[in-house]
Image (cartoon, rainbow, N blue to C red):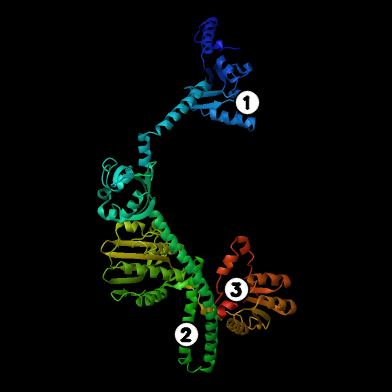
Amino acid sequence: MERIDPTLQSGTEPASLAEARLDLLQAALDHINQGFTVFDADLRLVAWNTRLFDMLDLPLRLAIRGTHLADYFRVIAERGEYGEGDVEDQVKMRVERALAFQPHYFERMRPTGQIIAVQGTPLPMGGFVTTYTDVTQERHYQEELEKTVEERTRALRQSEDWLRVVMDNVPALIAYMAPGPIYHFANRRYAEWFGHTPETIQNRLARDVIGAPLFDQLEPEIRRVFAGRAVSYEYNRADDTGKPVYMRSTLIPDMDTAGNVLGCFVLSLDITEQKHSETVLVETQRMEAVGQLTGGLAHDFNNLLTVIIGNLLALRGDALQAWAEDREGPIARIDPALHAAQRGAELTKRLLAFARGEPLDPSEVNIGTLVDNVVQLLRGSLPKNISLEAPGSEDPLHARIDPGQFENALVNLALNARDAFEGGGTIRIEVSQRHFSELEAEELGIRSGIYANIAVTDNGSGMDSTTQRHAFEPFYTTKKFGTGSGLGLAMVYGFSKQSGGLARLHSETGMGTTVSLLLPVISAADVHLDEELEEAIPDNLGQERLILLVEDEPDVATIVSEQLQQLGFNVLVVHDAKDALELISDIEDIEFMLSDIVMPGDMDGIQLAGSAKKIRPGLRIALMSGYRHSIEADYDRPEKMDAIRWPVLAKPFNLVDLARTLNVIS
């Protein structure tokens, strides 16, 4: 084996003397009980000892000065000691790691079970020195030592000291009462719950510890457990902050072999969060039931409104012709009825949105008009000791928002303000215009531009700083337990963010509260009115083509049929899917089909549309429904929703909606 190169001599020392000293150094290295290597900055071998090659079973051909570190890695990798993988990739990864010249230590178990500890230290001029230590026996000894410690720990767990540690750290209140009843033991949590320590609670009467009022409430249960029966009960008491905390306690009698009761074990758990969750769950289930009921009612109500609106529109048209000179007579009576029916239709849309848990589509609205609507609604619902002020906006402000959600948000804010009064006060709703620069908008997290600022102000009790920080959080409420959902302000905040705006709150204790809605304003040019759409209805849209109307409600079928005839269609009416398919098969002149989705029988409108398309691929189809929940229930997966390839017209609809839908498919 080649030794350390004798050319590494210093100064002009004779080569023979330098070589002798290097041999002496190599002999010393060979007697070290650890493996040893020195690699230079190029990762080439400079020095080593024979212990390394014996320890790692390395071939002696590598024991040559100048051998690259990669050659060592390659031999080990080819033997599979680095695990599965490409050999060259394993070598490359380790060479790159070595070139970092970072101090390192790791232990590697060889396939033989031998454990080698490798410690590398970088050298000042580049390269590093590495020692290799066989720590197999030490690790085995350490494992044995750990087993011994584990066995002793297991024995320790049976001791009273260890039991006290466990008892004090479990998330439960644990105690032991002897007849009296007198406390003989309580863990830290139990003692602190009643203002004691585990030491001061011992040998104290239960009445003195928990207080006479609570003891009198629980005494019947305590008597039962000392009679030999396990009992469970719930109670509540105020914590240090005055908030009610709910506890569930289980008492189990401790009896000797003769059946005599020596005492009882007490286990109490804090169930405040569980109580809160149960309340939220009950409220959620109630709201879900209300939502389902709401959806069903809205479906039937939409059919009624379709008849009412259709007849009113027809009557209005007849009245315009018959009383052209006296427009203030019958028209003045028809228009309010028509407006009320249309408001009812808008109401059902909101009910359906609630039933489905989805927001309505936004539209271009006049903020001032919506605020006026809410103010009129609130004037009749607020107590007489609360005055409502709404000065209105000087300039019309338009926004693209969900009108129903906006009105709901204002109502929520007004009712919150109402609840802030103890003996009456004033609520003020103001609409103004605000412009935010890029810097101001960036600080608020909104886009720069013009915003409508709708501020709801009260002079009630106000909020403290803690309440203000949490006011917009879901389920946070300062109202009495079970009387408020904590969702009002959260819904207001969510609506404002979804609309591209922001909700802000300012309050002072005893001075009142102001909640401001900031909603981005759109220009008047972006506002589209229904009258403009109505003027855009194509003349004779139907062109006397034949359309099949499928509607199971006779009154609804009559009104929709009349509307279709107004648009220039020839109409065939059937009341179920079976008759519809027969006519489609027999009458080739049918070019269109308009079908209700919810119908009696085994086939709904969507299934009818699919079957009709198979019979007549060129048939043009549109659907209508007063309640889309049925669609979502039956087509609850994306691949099923893809099957609804036809436009769906929401009931009740007017001539504009009907014309727009049929124009799309025509």
Q: Tell me the residue that label 1 is attached to.
A: 74
Mark 1, Cα crowd under 10 Å, few <14 / some 14-19 / many 20+, is some
Q: Tell me the residue that label 2 is attached to.
A: 337
Front residue of 213/40: it is 213
Mark 3, Cα crowd under 10 Å, few <14 / some 14-19 / many 20+, is many
Residue at the far front in the pictured view: 258
Front residue of 448/86: it is 86
* Distance Cα–Cα, label 1 vs label 3: 74 Å
Disc 2 secondary structure class: helix
Mark 2, Cα crowd under 10 Å, few <14 / some 14-19 / many 20+, is some
How many numbered marks have been drawn onto this rendered protein structure? 3
Q: Position of residue 487 (x, y in %)?
A: 41, 62
Q: Eyeballing the image, is 507 above or below 666?
A: above
Of circles 1 and 2, the one toward us is 2
Image marks 1 and 2: residues in contact by CB distance under 8 Å: no
Screen quadrant of the N terminus: top right
Q: Position of residue 426 (x, y in %)?
A: 29, 72
Of circles 3 and 2, the one toward us is 3
Tell me the amino acid under the disc marked 2: Ala
Disc 3 secondary structure class: loop
Residue at 52% across / 86% down in the picture? 312
Tell me the amino acid under the disc marked 1: Arg
Front residue of 190/141: it is 190
In the picture, the disc for residue 598 is 3
